Image (cartoon, rainbow, N blue to C red):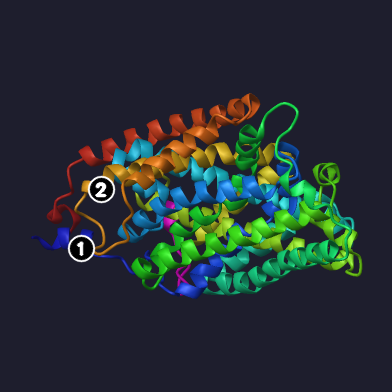
């Protein structure tokens, strides 16, 4: 083997990410991303789709999310690289499909951060001060980008504190709901009300599960920090399933507390449904809960921003995005170019869109990603590469995961599909361009060593 080939295969310490994440930090990273802003606003929407038995679609969504999470656990421990879904799809199907997977994931992440930036400037903040949305978005996203660029260790430590606050807020809702039940002011009959006038119980659970599924997404962002995890083969499955099961238990209890304590129509019409539980219980300042909600929104945006920047970095390293996105900050070795680029795009969206428009296509884009990840887990079963002794699940699990994505996609409204198809069309064009460039680059003869000298 010649020396030039050896150099091309050797890791470049200047562009590789630093391993610092332990199992507890990774657990809190995933838990903090899953227990984000979604549950603070979606309980009312789920109640509108399924009725008072909010816990049922939440439980169904957890089971569906676990299927895809299992495929992620297998692939992340086999190929612990920052590209995540894009890297897996590239290995299974080639760069074109890899670009589509990464593009959908990256677009969903950028849009999500933009939506959370606008959400941060909404009702919970106006509980204290009314500021222009544009000003809040600029300051909010700049602060998150600086923390992201400072380092994954600092970001995840901040996440641990924020996650504890988030969990504390949700536990508070559960405790207050239990107090309302014990004092006799709750209606436990609502917990068995499943279905709406337009559909029966099964259809109501499925419709509610589509919305509830958004509350569980976030686990997929963690594969983009697998490269920065000290021992991903052992740490990742434990952190992933532990965080999802913890979030699922909290969500089901929150759903029970909210539905029993607050009339279904009030939950459905409220922009802050969990705040209605606090008001119904009394004795707790609404401002305190607003602070907790703001922390939840900020933490969700921070973790999604980390994912987006690492994904952009990974795709660039795979040759699917411009090479400049692989630039890292000297010393701290964080993907500074990717952090700046994804933040600027999120800011542009936050200044020009609204929360509903920004959020409506997220689930659809993620379902495309999840379908590709599940099928990639099947295709790559025969691949002898990757880390040895990685986590494995029965092949039926990714099959059921792919089927669940198709099932959930059939429940998404036509107008969301239209917006999603436009986004996907742009991705297909960009993927074709990236594939052509990669093919041309691969066809060029390597420069002779004497020419370089």
Q: Is residue 405 magenta?
A: no
Query: Is 382 on the left or on the right of 174, as rendered?
Result: left
Check disc 2 and report the residue beneath it.
381
Q: Is residue 329 magenta?
A: yes
* Most foreground residue, 384 or 333: 384
Q: Specify the segment rendered in magenta.
A: 323-333
Please name which of the two marks, 1 or 2, marks the residue nearer to the observer: 2
Residue 203: name its quadrant. top right
Report x, y in % for residue 274.
Answer: 79, 56
At label 2, counting other C-alpha atoms closer than 10 Å, the crowd grade (few under 14, some 14-19, many 20 or more) is some
* Most foreground residue, 398 or 196: 196
Residue at far left of view: 1
Report x, y in % for residue 438.
Answer: 31, 39
- The residue at the point 88 percent across, 61 percent down is 184
* Most foreground residue, 313 or 81: 81
Magenta-colored segment: predominant secondary structure: loop
Q: Which mark is residue 171?
A: none
Quadrant of image for the N terminus: bottom left
- The residue at the point 69 percent across, 53 percent down is 39
Query: Is 223 on the left or on the right of 11, as rendered?
Result: right
- The residue at the point 59 percent across, 50 percent down is 59
Q: Secondary structure at mark 2?
A: helix
Q: Secondary structure at mark 1?
A: helix
Mark 1 or mark 2: name the one nearer the start of the chain.
Answer: 1
Quadrant of image for the C terminus: bottom left
Q: Is residue 353 visible?
A: no
Report x, y in % for residue 340.
Answer: 57, 56
Q: Which mark is residue 7?
A: 1
* Distance CA(mark 1)–CA(mark 2): 30 Å
């Amino acid at each position: 083997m010649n020396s030039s080939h050896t150099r091309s295969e050797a890791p470049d310490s200047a562009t590789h990410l630093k391993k610092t994440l332990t199992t507890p930090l990774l657990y809190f990273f995933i838990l903090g991303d899953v227990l984000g802003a979604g549950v603070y606003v979606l309980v009312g929407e789920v109640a509108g789709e399924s009725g008072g038995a909010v816990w049922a679609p939440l439980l169904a969504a957890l089971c569906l999310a676990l299927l895809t999470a299992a495929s992620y656990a297998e692939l992340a421990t086999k190929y612990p690289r920052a590209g995540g879904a894009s890297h897996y799809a590239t290995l299974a199907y080639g760069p074109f499909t890899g670009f589509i997977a990464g593009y959908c994931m990256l677009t969903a992440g950028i849009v999500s951060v933009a939506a959370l930036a606008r959400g941060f400037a909404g009702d919970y903040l106006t509980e204290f001060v009314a500021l222009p949305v544009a000003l809040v978005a600029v300051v909010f996203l700049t602060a998150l980008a600086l923390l992201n660029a400072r380092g994954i260790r600092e970001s995840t430590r901040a996440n641990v504190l924020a996650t504890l606050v988030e969990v504390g807020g949700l536990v508070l809702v559960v405790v207050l709901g239990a107090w309302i039940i014990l004092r006799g002011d709750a209606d436990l009959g609502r917990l068995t009300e499943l279905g709406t006038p337009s559909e029966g119980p099964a259809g109501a659970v499925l419709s509610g599960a589509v919305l509830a599924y958004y509350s569980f997404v976030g686990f997929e962002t963690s594969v983009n920090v697998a490269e920065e995890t000290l021992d991903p083969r052992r740490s990742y499955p434990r952190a992933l399933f532990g965080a999802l099961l913890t979030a699922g238990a909290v969500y089901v209890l929150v759903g029970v507390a909210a539905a029993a304590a607050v009339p279904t129509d009030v939950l459905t019409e409220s922009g802050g449904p969990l705040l209605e539980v606090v008001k119904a219980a009394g004795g707790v300042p609404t401002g305190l809960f607003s602070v907790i909600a703001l922390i939840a929104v900020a933490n969700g945006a921070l973790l999604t921003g980390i994912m987006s920047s690492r994904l952009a970095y990974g795709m660039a390293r795979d040759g699917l995005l411009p090479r400049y996105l692989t630039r890292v900050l000297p010393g701290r070795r964080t993907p500074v170019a990717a952090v700046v680029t994804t933040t600027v795009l999120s800011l542009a969206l936050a200044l020009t869109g609204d929360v509903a428009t920004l959020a409506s296509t997220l689930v659809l884009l993620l379902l495309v990603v999840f379908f590709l990840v599940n099928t990639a887990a099947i295709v790559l079963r025969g691949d002898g590469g990757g880390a040895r002794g990685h986590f494995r699940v029965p092949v039926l699990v990714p099959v059921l995961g792919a089927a669940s994505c198709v099932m959930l996609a059939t429940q998404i409204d036509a107008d969301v599909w239209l917006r999603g198809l436009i986004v996907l069309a742009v991705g297909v064009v960009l993927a074709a361009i990236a594939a052509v460039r990669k093919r041309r680059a691969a066809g060029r003869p390597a420069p002779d060593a004497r020419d370089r000298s």
